[in-house]
Amino acid sequence: MTELRYDAMDDASAAMLANRLKGRPIDVVVLNAGVGSGADVPAEELTAEHWEKVMLTNTFAPLHLAGLLEPNLRLAEKKVLVAISSLAASMSLYQVPRQYAYRASKAALNQMLRNLSVDWKDWGCICLPLRPGRVKTRMSEFEGDLSPEQSVTGMRQVIDSATSEMSGLHRGYDGQVVAW
Ligand SMILES: NC(=O)c1ccc[n+]([C@@H]2O[C@H](COP(=O)([O-])OP(=O)(O)OC[C@H]3O[C@@H](n4cnc5c(N)ncnc54)[C@H](OP(=O)(O)O)[C@@H]3O)[C@@H](O)[C@H]2O)c1
């Protein structure tokens, strides 16, 4: 199997990846790369550099890559675009302080997926912002309620049973809709 490299901070690598995948149907694209949830500084200590990195990685890069891989999804039978979102995106549910850039980036990511669900409806692409739960990974400093396997098993079930009615809605690994 050939390893395909991708750096969300490097547009050229996204273009190169899409070029390598040209002509291949892809049933499910999962946009997973993310950074920044640990940055817990108050507003006055935020830097433009941090804001830019988080927004580029978590919002711009997945949208751009989704656009580059649109032809692959169109060629496929299933046609599902998933972006790994977060409860941190929810304006009504999430009450944890700070994490300004991360929260803004995931809320914007959800908006982009909703946008794509409208733009790509006519050719049947299902666009799903998906919340993995609180998972024990490097990002959460290995604290959380779920192992990566539990989270992925739940998300796979949601993806497998995805229908067009679910497109553009934020759901959790447990299949529940997450309020905006
Ligand atoms: N863990 C949680 O509780 C939790 C909760 C809600 C949402 N999420 C979301 O779940 C997703 C996965 O995070 P995780 O928990 O697995 O954290 P993680 O262990 O820190 O993994 C982050 C992933 O993003 C990749 N990545 C970061 N910057 C990248 C870049 N510039 N180009 C390409 N890949 C890049 C990393 O690749 P490398 O390994 O090569 O660095 C790694 O695969 C993220 O979108 C995160 O926001 C996680």
Image (cartoon, rainbow, N blue to C red):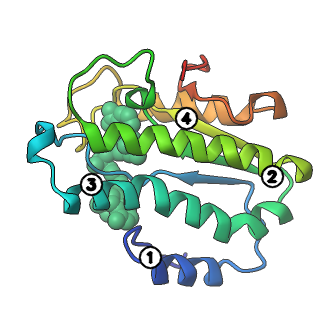
Q: Residue 5 got which mark?
A: 1
Q: Cβ of disc 2 within 8 Å of ligand 1? A: no
The mark nearer the N terminus, 2 or 1, is 1
Residue kind at label 4, given as amino acid type: Leu
- Chain-order first, disc 2 or disc 4: 2
Mark 2 is surrounded, within 10 Å at the Cα level, by few (under 14), some (14 to 19) or many (20 or more) other residues, namely some
Kindly indicate whether the residue at mark 1 contacts the one at mark 3 (C-beta within 8 angstroms): no
Query: Dot 4 lies on which element?
Result: strand
Indicate the secondary structure of the residue bearing disc 1: loop
- Residue indicated by mark 4: 130
Q: CA distance from mark 2 to mark 4?
A: 18 Å
Image location of residue 169, percent across then percent down = 66, 29
C-alpha gap between disc 2 and disc 1: 27 Å
Q: Quadrant of residue 38?
A: top left
Residue shown at the point (56%, 81%) measured from the top left: 15
In the image, farthest residue toward the front = 44
Disc 2: which residue: 120
Q: Position of residue 87 (x, y in %)?
A: 42, 26
> In front of the other: label 2 or label 4?
2
Secondary structure, mark 3, is helix
The amino acid pointed to by label 1 is Arg
The label on residue 51 is 3
- Screen quadrant of the N terminus: bottom right
